[in-house]
């Protein structure tokens, strides 16, 4: 049974000091989801919140989900299970691998099943969950990455956490959000929470033709957000300019980034700021969506 789980601290909101912002009169603060907990990190925790509420209400014995051998989502689920004392099962893509993430999942007590590549490809088929529901009766099943309407709903809390800290930052107001988008679920949840009050900018970690615009539109319609190309040749593609930018940001702001989502998003923001997309006096909030545990796979 799932007990209390929603007492994690606020993600801190901090000013960012980069020269490229100052030159264009743009102010940027970062909401550090990477700092909410030593183990449970990032937007994946917010995407899980409503799933855990449903599982708790249904008296589910545990939670099952799926992902790859570096999955930030499975990592957040397994560490939440350990922290809050509920059972977790992970269905993994491919064949048994030893990665830092997989070692953590095991240490957190997550039961792992390797589905192979073919088995994992079946995950969107109607009968996919049946054998797992038979093996784990009454468990709550979460789709890959925690996507969909329940995942989006939990991300509304991200907006609340930032707004609760604006005064402490000395900001009366802000003009918009800038964040990385993978499936676009986090962005969709923030668009819903903002309800048109502030623009939400999503920097795409995947190519524009990978279905994200359609998925976001299905969740929230067409208003209140903009999607920007940011993947630099494909999901997971890393280049020298990106790595140099990442190192420079880390040195200037004492803020660790990872190359797949947060560094690409911030580099895309610099491109827009330098192109004059935001006028002087614009105040933006960059979402640090976490994911640092997955960076170990890149070393
Ligand atoms: C998963 C992930 C994202 C993308 O979130 P979506 O809700 O799929 O758009 C962004 N940043 C990090 C660090 C992630 O792990």
Image: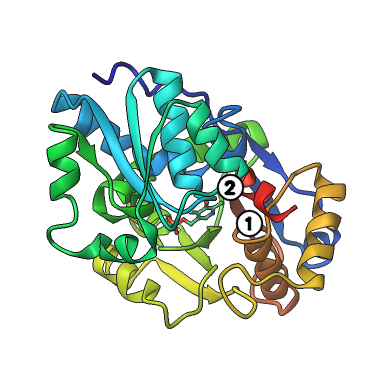
Query: Of the residues tagged 2 and 1, which is closer to the observer?
Result: 2
**Residue beneath the point at 55% across and 58% down:** 179
The numbered disc on residue 262 is: 1
| Front-lying residue, 36 or 159 | 36
User: In which quadrant of the rendered view does residue 214 lie?
Assistant: bottom left
Label 1 neighbour load within 10 Å: few <14, some 14-19, many 20+? many
Cβ at disc 1 under 8 Å from ligand 1:
yes
How far apart in space, not on screen, are marks 2 and 1 (Cα)?
Answer: 8 Å
Cβ at disc 2 under 8 Å from ligand 1:
yes
The numbered disc on residue 205 is: none
- Dot 2 or dot 1: first in sequence order is 1
The numbered disc on residue 291 is: 2
User: In which quadrant of the rendered view does residue 48 lie?
Assistant: top left
* Image colouring: rainbow
| Front-lying residue, 236 or 24 | 236
Task: Say if 249 sits above or below 290 in the image.
Answer: below
Label 2 neighbour load within 10 Å: few <14, some 14-19, many 20+? many
SS for callout 1 = helix
Can residue 244 be seen here? yes
Cβ atoms under marks 2 and 1 closer than 8 Å: yes
**Residue beneath the point at 47% across and 80% down:** 208
Residue 109 in the image, given as x and y percentages of width and height: 43, 26
Number of numbered discs: 2
**Residue beneath the point at 71% across and 71% down:** 273
User: Is 129 positioned to the left or the right of 103 in the image?
Assistant: left
User: In which quadrant of the rendered view does residue 156 lie?
Assistant: top left
| Front-lying residue, 285 or 213 | 213
User: Is 164 positioned to the left or the right of 145 in the image?
Assistant: right
């Amino acid at each position: 049974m799932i007990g209390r789980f929603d007492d994690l601290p606020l993600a801190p909101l901090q000013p960012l000091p980069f020269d490229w912002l100052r030159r264009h009169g743009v102010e940027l603060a970062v909401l550090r989801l990477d700092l909410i907990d030593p183990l449970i990190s990032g937007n994946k925790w917010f995407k899980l919140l409503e799933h855990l509420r449903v599982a708790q209400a249904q008296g589910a014995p545990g939670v099952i989900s799926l992902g790859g051998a570096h999955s930030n989502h499975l990592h957040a689920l397994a560490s939440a299970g350990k922290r809050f004392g509920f059972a977790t099962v992970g269905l993994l893509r491919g064949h048994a691998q030893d990665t830092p993430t997989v070692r953590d999942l095991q240490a957190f007590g997550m039961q792992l099943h390797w589905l192979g590549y073919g088995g994992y490809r079946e995950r969107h088929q109607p009968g996919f969950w049946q054998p797992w529901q038979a093996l784990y009766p009454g468990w709550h099943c979460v789709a890959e990455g925690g996507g969909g309407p329940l995942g989006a709903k939990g991300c509304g809390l991200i907006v609340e956490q930032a707004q609760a800290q604006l005064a402490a930052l000395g900001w009366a107001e802000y003009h918009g959000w800038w964040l990385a988008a993978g499936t676009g679920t986090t962005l969709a949840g923030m668009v819903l929470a903002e309800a048109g009050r502030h623009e939400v900018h999503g920097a795409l970690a995947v190519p524009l033709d990978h279905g994200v615009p359609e998925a976001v539109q299905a969740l929230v319609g067409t208003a209140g957000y903009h999607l920007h190309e940011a993947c630099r040749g494909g999901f997971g593609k890393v280049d020298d300019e990106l790595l140099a930018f990442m190192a420079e940001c880390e040195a200037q702001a004492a803020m660790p980034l990872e190359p797949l989502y947060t560094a690409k998003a911030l580099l895309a923001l610099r491109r827009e700021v330098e192109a004059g997309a935001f006028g002087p006096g614009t105040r933006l909030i960059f979402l640090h969506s976490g994911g640092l545990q997955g960076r170990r796979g890149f070393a």
